[in-house]
Every structure is written in structure tokens, then in C-alpha cells.
Image (cartoon, rainbow, N blue to C red):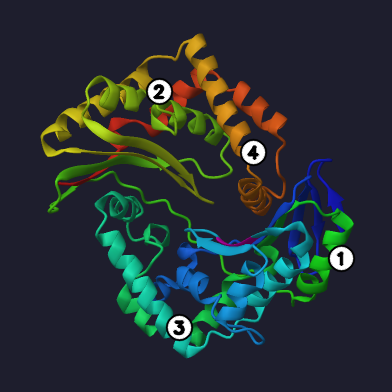
Amino acid sequence: MKESDNMEFQTHIFSNGIRLIHKQVDARAAYFGLIVNAGSRDEAEEEHGMAHFIEHTIFKGTQKRNTYRIISRLEDVGGDLDAYTTKEETFIYASFLKNDYEKAIELIWDIVFNSTFPDKELEKEKLVIYDEINSYKDSPAEQIFDDFEELVFRNHPIGKNILGTPAHLKRFGKKHIEKFMKANYCTDEMVLSSVGDISFSKLVTVTEKYFGVVPTNIRKNKRIKFNSYKPEYKTVKKDTHQSHCIIGNIAYDVRDKKRVGLILLNNILAGQNMNSRLNMSLREKHGYVYTVESGYAQYSDTGILTIYFGTDKDYLGKSMNLVYKELEKLRTQKISVSQLEKAKKQIIGQITISSESNPGLMIAMAKSHLLYNRVDTLEKIYRKIENISAEELLEIANEVLDKNRLTTLIFS
């Protein structure tokens, strides 16, 4: 069954529920991937780290290929195969020359649906992940983000770190992997995403050849909704030169209409731009920090806003006071017309530049189609941003940046 959202993106649904979205571009390089609505929050208690473990071991052998042949299939022709895992998704994707489309499609199908998970390779990959876990522990600026989410989402699956623990990993075997995949790698929760110079009719034919014959597997288990947030303030003693601090709160989920306004507010606060309010205050004006940033992560039933900075221990209190001062301004002072227009132009520019990256576009298309069954055109995104008012930003700031609702974690 075919359907067309607009002329820019073309879509198809296979009989087993797997969806396909494509954008044809005039380029020599092409990008194709499979996103699955399954991540670390879908793990049972005894499965902690399983989603990420699968991401690693899915490349370790299929019924007809060993690890070397999997790696070499695209690399021998200049391509690349990669994957990542988050709290709610797993993505396996490839970059390659446009003439190698079928090679990439067949390879991703093979590793996702025909992996054999040899015991020897599983044990070898556990060592790699043990090292990955230890490297995080050696980097407080990275570890604090995992610890912060565990604090905010206390006793809930979404709060668990993605890597798992050595104790959990040690017990994992092939039967545990297959059990998780059967429950969570569901055909109605999969999207194939493509950006490249291939006609849509040919792409459908090739993907149907492999993914169209996958047995239907409809998701039955539902995620446990998070609804038990309580603000906390916690300091952890660390033998580090710097103090590391995260301040944040739960926020809007992926379907909340206010999320676009919070994306804009986050950019104003300490997003990816150097002229953000917190960067100008903490770094440029006072010189207290090298890095200060804010981020907004959206999940299916909740979200989280974080403000992070690292500073000399002598400047920790002063830096925190400056953060609170800027948050108070956003809650009490309506942003001016000129400031609002500048902020909108800034984020529209960032979105436009990022949309010129075809690998990034392939990932963004996959995520949007998975969640909303559509991909908005740039023009529609621009309209949503242009419609945000100063009053809306003030309301959002008071809901999300209320000092009494903030959780704080400090490594000092």
C-alpha cells in the first residue's frame, strides 16, 4: 500500500507493518537506515543494558556472513555501516555510493533479521562494553548526565543508563537477546528511511524483496508511563579539579504542543549558540566556565530539560546564582519583540543548515515518521516557530523553570 504525504517525501507501508520513507536527491552518496521503536527503557530489570548490547552484537555474524564479511560488505566499496541506541530507539544505518543501494538494503536486512549471535563473539563484545562503561566513569562531564536522569526518573525504566552494568552484561546470552528482540523489534514499530538518488518505485521494489517478507510481529507490551517526579538536590564528592553541575526539570513529551516553544526557549537559554544567555553571562561576562549548555530531550510520555556547566570549585556557588538569575528573568520578564524575532531567525537558520546534511536528514525523517507517521516540510516547521508568542514562552518558562521544581546534581 502506497501513500504520499507531499512531493518532498514519499512513503510506503508493507503488509507486515514496516514503513518506508524516502527523499530523492541528486547526489552521488546515499543513506539508508532502519529505526526501531525500542531502547533501554523497554528492558526488564534483569535486561539492563540489553538494547545497547544488541546494537553491538548484531554486527557479529549472520547465517551467511561472519563479522569480517559484514564489515567489508560496504567498506570495500567506500561505504560505512553504523548504529546507535537511545532510551527509546535503536537505529542501524549505512552510507554508500548510490549504485550500491541494494547492497546496503540487503546487509541491514541480514543483520537485523538473520543474526546468529555466536557465543564467542558475545563474550568478546562484553569486554568492549565493559571498557566503554569504565571510560564513562573516567569522564565526570559525561557520567553526570546519566546520573542526573537516574535521579529525575528515580525507580523508573527511563532513568536507567543505556550501557547497563557489568553484572547484567555477564549474564546475557543468545536466548536473552532473542527474547528481547521478539518482544521489542516489532514490524509495526519499524521505519526504513532513505535519502539518495534512486527512484521511489525502484526503492520500493528492492526493499519489498527483503523487508516485505519479514513475518508480521505486532507490539503487545506497553511502556510504563512516568508520573512520579519529585525535585531533589544532591551533591556527590568526586576527586576532580572541577565541579560539575546539572540543574533541570521534567518537560513536555514528543506530542505536546508546547514542545516547539521549549525548543526555542532552550536555544535562548544555552543551546548550541555562543550568544545564548547563560554562555554570555557565565563565560563571556564573568569567565567562570569553559562550557555551559542546556538540552531538551523528548520522550514518548515525558521529557527533560537540563542545564550543565563545569567550573572551578571556588566559582560553583557564583555560577549557580547566575543560572538562577537568568531563569528568573525568563519567568518574570516577557521577551521583547526584537529579541523574539532574533531568536526565531537564529533557530530557523540552524534548522535550515542542518537540513542540508543528508545523513542527518535521513535520521530526522526516520524519527519523525516513526513517531508521527509524517515528516513536516521546512516551511511548516518555520510556521510553527513563527507562531510562537512571547506570552507562550513566559508560560513555558514558569512551568519548566520554576526554581521549586528543579532538580540539582553536583559532582564536587
Badge 2 crowding class, 10 Å Cα cut-off, few under 14, some 14 to 19, many 20 or more, is some
Report if residue 91 lies within the magenta region: yes
Of labels 4 and 2, earlier in sequence is: 2
Taking the spot 32% from the left edge, 35% from the top edge, the residue there is 292
Taking the spot 53% from the left edge, 84% from the top edge, the residue there is 117
For disc 3, the marked residue is 122
Q: Let me know if residue 109 appears in the view.
A: yes
Badge 1 crowding class, 10 Å Cα cut-off, few under 14, some 14 to 19, many 20 or more, is few
Badge 3 crowding class, 10 Å Cα cut-off, few under 14, some 14 to 19, many 20 or more, is many
Classify the position of the N terminus by image quarter.
bottom right
Of labels 3 and 2, earlier in sequence is: 3
Marks 2 and 1, how far apart at CA: 48 Å
For disc 2, the marked residue is 275
Q: Position of residue 238 (x, y in %)?
A: 14, 53
* Front-most of residues 285 and 91: 285
Q: Amino acid at mark 1?
A: Thr
Taking the spot 80% from the left edge, 52% from the top edge, the residue there is 11
Q: Let me know if residue 172 appears in the view.
A: no
Report if residue 5 lies within the magenta region: no
Of labels 4 and 3, earlier in sequence is: 3
Helix, strand or loop status at disc 3: helix
Q: Which residues are magenta?
A: 90-94
- Provide the major secondary structure of the magenta segment: strand
Taking the spot 77% from the left edge, 67% from the top edge, the residue there is 102
Marks 3 and 1, how far apart at CA: 35 Å
